Structure formats: C-alpha cells, structure tokens
Amino acid sequence: MTVIDISPSVMQFLLAFIVVAPLLGALAALLPAPPGLKGKNPDQAVLRHGVTVTGAVLVAAIVLAAGFDHDHPATMQATTDISWIPALDVRIHLGIDGISLPLLVLTALLTFLCALYSYFKLPAGPSPKAFVALVLVLESGTLATFAVLDLLLFFLAFEMVLIPMYFLIARWGGDQRQAAAWKFILYTLLGSVVMLLGLLLIGLKSGTFDMVALATDNGRGLTTSVQVIAVLAIGLGLAVKTPMWPLHSWLPDAHTAAPTVGSVLLAGVLLKMGTYGFVRILLPVAPDGMRTFAPYLAAFAVVGIVYGSLACLALARTGAKGDLKRLIAYSSVGHMGFVLLGIATMTPTGVNGALFANIAHGLITGLLFFLVGAIKDRYGTADLDTLAGATGAALYGRAPRLGALLAFAAVASLGLPGLAGFWGEMLTLFGAYSPAEGLSRPAFRTFMAIGAFGTLLTAAYMLIVVRRVCMGEHAPHSRLSPEEQAPQTTDGPEPSGAAGSQPSGSAGPRTATTPQLADIHPYEAVAWTPLAALTVVAGLWPAVLLGLTDPAVQQLLAGGKS
C-alpha cells in the first residue's frame, strides 16, 4: 500500500535528490548571490537559501515516504546501484527500507527546522554563508549515511559530518568552544580509524562491500573469529558516535559549547548514526560476533543509563551551578543507553524498541535543546541556580507558554505513557526480559531491572528541572539579603527581570522591576510545533512507526529471509 502511486524511476530520483541536493546547495551558498536574489541584506539572502534548500529536501523526503510501499517495508526501495570503483567492487548503491526511512525523514525535518530557526535567530559568529554551507554539508552526510548500501560509502558518509560539526562548534559556539570542538573531532576520528579497519576486514574476507548481500549471507561467509574482530573494531567506532559509556565524555562538552541548532542536530540526528550502524551492519552481517559481545554491550548500556541519570541529578541539585544544556546532554547518554540495550538483546522486540527510542529521542531532545537555547537567549545564561533563583525566574509566571512547553518536553523525555518516549523504553525492557537464544537470560533480566531503575532516576531529575526552572524556588524564610538572592549571570547581559520581586504566581508580589519575559515568538512556534505534535502522534499511534520497522527488523535478524 502506498499513499500516492509513484513510479520506481521517480522514487530513485527522489532518493538521489535528497542525498545530493544539500551538497549542491552548500556549494551554491558560497557563491555570490544573483543580483535579483540579493535583496537589501545579503546575509538574509543566504539564510533564505538555506531554508529553501532544506525545505525542498524535506518535501522530497515526505513525497518519498508517501510513495513508499508500506506493505513491503522489508524490501529495499528506490534503489540505485551503479559501479563506482570496479577494482574494489565499490558501488554507488542507495536504497531505503522501513528501518532507514523514518531516520531519513527525521533528519530532513530537523535540518529544515534548524534552518528556519536560524533565519530569525542566527548564532553569533563568522559569515552566514559559511554557516549555511556547513549545515547543508552536515545534512547531506547524515542523509547519505541512512541511504547508502555499500560499506565504504557508509564510512565516507559517516565521516562527512565530522568537519561541519567541528566548525559549527568551534566558530559559532559559546564558552570553551575550541576545546569542545577538538575533543569532539579527536574522539570521533580515532573511533573511525578503527571502524574502517573492521569494515575493510568484512569486505575483504567476504569478497563484497554490498550491505544487502552481506545481510542476506548473515555471516555464513565469515568465520567466528573474523566476526568477533569485526564487531570489536566497528563497534568501537559506532560506540563513540552513539555515544556509549565510557566513550561519552566528548558529548557534554560539545553540547554545552555548541550553538542551539548545533545541539539540535548533534542530538537529533548525529547520535543516531552510531546506533543505525549497529542495526544495519553488525546485527545481520556478524551475528556470531554480536552474540559474543552482546552481554558486554548491554552491561555498558545500563551503566550509561544509571550514570547519565546520576550526573543529571548532580547537576540539578541546588547550589551545583549546573548548566541546563549540559544536563540535557547527559540525559542523552542515558537515553542512548536504552537504544544500545535494545540492540544487545538481538530480538525483534528489543531492536524495534531501539529504533523507536531513536526517533523519540530525536524529536524530544531536539525540542529540549531548542527550548534551552531560547531560555538562554532570554536570561543570558543556562545556569540552573540562576534560572531557579528565589527572586523570580519561574517560567510559568514570566513566559507561561515557554514554561508549559518545557514541562511537556521534560515529561516526554522521562517516558510518560501516551508520548513518544514511553514505547522505546518499554519495548527495550521487554526485549531484555527474553533475549535472543544463546544469551544469558538471568544476566539480561538483571540488566532489565537496572534499566527500569534508570527510568525512575530519569523521572526524578526531569521533575526537579521542571520544578526549579518552571516554578522557581520559593525561599520565604531565607536569611539572604535581596541583593544576595538576586540571580547573577556570567555569560551574557543581565536578563530581563533578573532583579526585583517574585513574578506572578510565585511567592511575593510583582513589581514594575520584574517585567514579563518574551514568550514564544511566532518563528519559534513554527519551528517547535512539529516536534511537539509528532511526539504526541508517535506516543498515541506507535503502530505507524512499528509497522515500518518490524518487518524489516524481522527479515534483518533472519538473514534476509522473510
């Protein structure tokens, strides 16, 4: 069943267009604008160009999804297979199935929303031309990662995103941006070198780099020792990008320093590339090697879940001077731990849960970083103690719509039933309860219990954030003087209403010295509403997504057999 009937040749063109158009758009962004398109402000012209290109890619992705045959989501569709380097049997092989299609659409959507947001709120930094070009190159590399079906092309696309993200952090980021950018690039490059060796090992030992042929062979052409070495090498590179504990330490620094749109793209799409590689390559190509390492992968995953939650609790406590962006970054370590746990179960239930959690995390954490960026713009800081200061930084009283949306995103992130975050975690835990044959059931049930405990910790720190930032902290018996109680900002101008009395709805009367903050601007509403709406839709109708992924996962785990 398709929503609209599209010929195979048009589907091929659409997929190729989605991958190539952002790259061509990046080149065009660096060229002088035609006289008729310059307008009064050349900077705005190039930002309009970014919105136009990413919008066209999003439209093409939606049309591609509408033309996708939902009755056969396990079949590769819109395929292009052209010989590129005959001597190495490297081919330009593109295609999508029920696993890659949702990630493709998510990437196109988030990049468009980031381009739209940047049109109105460009981060401080060098030329807008370079900014738009880097965002488009980043989009092209990410989309290519989810669309290519050749191991070497996968590696090239996987690496293509590193340089643009490095410059987005280093040139448009905040405090400590240079150190954060270097940490990001060094971690990911070192992991990628090891990953390339594993990919070459698989290709040379099996005689092909074609991912479809390798998945169909299901590891029968590779010895167990080769599979173990390949999983260790490739898994290390993928684990850095995911990121898996203890290879995660680059992520909080990168998120804290990155501009708002950089954080959205990093959390929303770049982290998904690592887990996608586990599902697309390691599970079907090296099942024996994955079975060997699955318990260790699950153990690292649940440690990451608990570690990320405890780090968030430490940042959220009063007096810790925790950065809200850093807290959301550590929450990603925990959420991606659930994704890795689902993959480690090697069951359809667990892998489907991992894929669902991937999409949910992209929607919810993308929205959270948008909101935290907006709060930082308004207050001049993301310091939790400042935002929750006793003098009245409560969002509910100052910017009620912004506060309500932050609370919505927080409860979605903690896995409230009825929202997208619930289903991925639940299915992952179900998969851990009954792992694949050959895996220790007592061990995985222990991992399940630890993961379930992690959901309680997630709820704890998210509710603390909502209480402190949205409601403010009431200290009627405080012995501090009014001057000591006033929040202090260190990374920006004094926030609107940072001094004075409590806002409406908090302890103490309002005075003229505590004006309202700007609530949600129209351009912010346009950029954020799709993410909030899809979070609700995915939570209420999970079958829409699971109907795509489940047949493809079943076939992938069965070695290409339906």
Image (tube, rainbow, N blue to C red):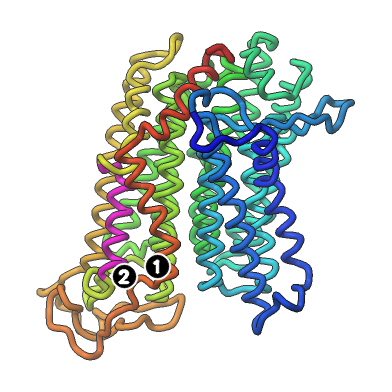
Q: Position of residue 236 (x, y in %)?
A: 60, 33
Magenta part of the protein: which range? 400-416
| Amino acid at pointer 2 | Leu
The span from disc 2 to disc 1 (Cα, nearest Å) is 7 Å
Residue that appears at 60% across and 47% down: 60
222 on left or right of 467: right
Q: Where 534 falls versus 546 (above or below)?
A: below
Residue matched to label 1: 382
User: Is disc 2 in contact with disc 1, using a CB cutoff of under 8 Å?
Assistant: yes
Rendered position, 170 above or below 38: above
- Residue 396 visible to the viewer: yes
Which residue is outermost to the front? 5
* Nearer to the camera, 424 or 383: 424
Please state if 521 lies on the left or on the right of 258 as rendered.
Answer: left
- Residues packed near mark 2 inside 10 Å, few (<14), some (14 to 19) or many (20 plus): many
Work out whether residue 17 or residue 50 is closer to the camera in this orientation and state it.
17
Identify the element where label 1 is drawn.
loop
